[in-house]
Image: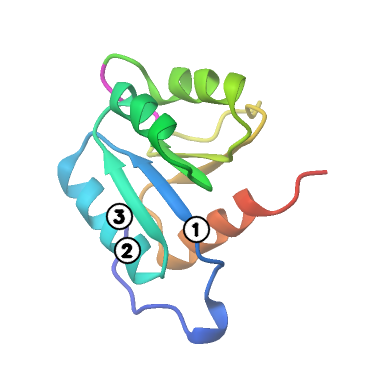
Amino acid sequence: MTTEPPPSPERQSQKLRVLLVEDDADTLATTLKLLEALGHWATGVASAEAAISRFFDGAFDVVMVDIGLPALSGHDFAEKLLSEHNVPVIFVTGQPKPGTAMRGTTWLRKPYTVDQLMDVLDHAMAPQA
């Protein structure tokens, strides 16, 4: 993630409830602060296993998940989540985007800008055809 000024008022995204799954503590803290600065309500966990229990405890508009999680990978977590729930999933990773996308998912490559984060949140929440 790169540092840049906050977005202009006309560039604000809709306000979302975001579950962030990230095993790197610094990245988790920084991304949560950024999401909150953008006006979203966000909570974070460090593992897919914790995310599964947290997801069922509350309602989220979108889930952001790192691919390279220990134990249960972000990809496996998304498959499990999407098999039971209709919630947009954003994969946040340094890996290149795969040729075939999983239904209900969007890709955000690290490092990313504030505008790229806003764009991917908007895209994830757009009605799917």
Kindly check if marks 2 and 1 are in contact, taking CB atoms under 8 A apart as contact. no
Circle 3 packing at 10 Å, graded few (<14), some (14-19), many (20+), is: some
- Residue 31: numbered disc: 3
Asked where in the image residue 105 lies, by quadrant, the reply is: top right
Q: Amino acid at mark 3?
A: Thr
Q: Amino acid at mark 1?
A: Leu
Asked where in the image residue 51 lies, by quadrant, the reply is: top left
Task: Give the SS element for disc 2.
Answer: helix
Q: Where is 22 relative to 4, above or below?
A: above
| Residue 5, position as x, y percentages in the image | 34, 79
Q: Main secondary structure of the magenta part?
A: loop
Kindly check if marks 3 and 1 are in contact, taking CB atoms under 8 A apart as contact. no
Which of pointers 2 and 1 lies earlier in the amino acid sequence? 1
User: Of tags 2 and 1, which is closer to the observer?
Assistant: 1
The residue most toward the front is 57
Asked where in the image residue 45 lies, by quadrant, the reply is: top left
Q: Residue at x 26, y 19 (%)?
A: 70
3D distance between C-alphas at marks 3 and 1: 14 Å
Q: Amino acid at mark 2?
A: Leu
Q: Which residues are magenta?
A: 66-70
| Residue 39, position as x, y percentages in the image | 41, 70
Q: Which residue is mark 2?
A: 34
Task: Give the SS element for disc 1.
Answer: loop
Residue 26 horizontal side relative to residue 93, left or right: left
| Residue 96, position as x, y percentages in the image | 48, 35
- Residue 16: numbered disc: 1
Which of pointers 3 and 1 lies earlier in the amino acid sequence? 1
Task: Give the SS element for disc 3.
Answer: helix
3D distance between C-alphas at marks 2 and 1: 13 Å
Kindly check if marks 2 and 3 are in contact, taking CB atoms under 8 A apart as contact. yes
Q: Residue at x 20, y 38 (%)?
A: 24
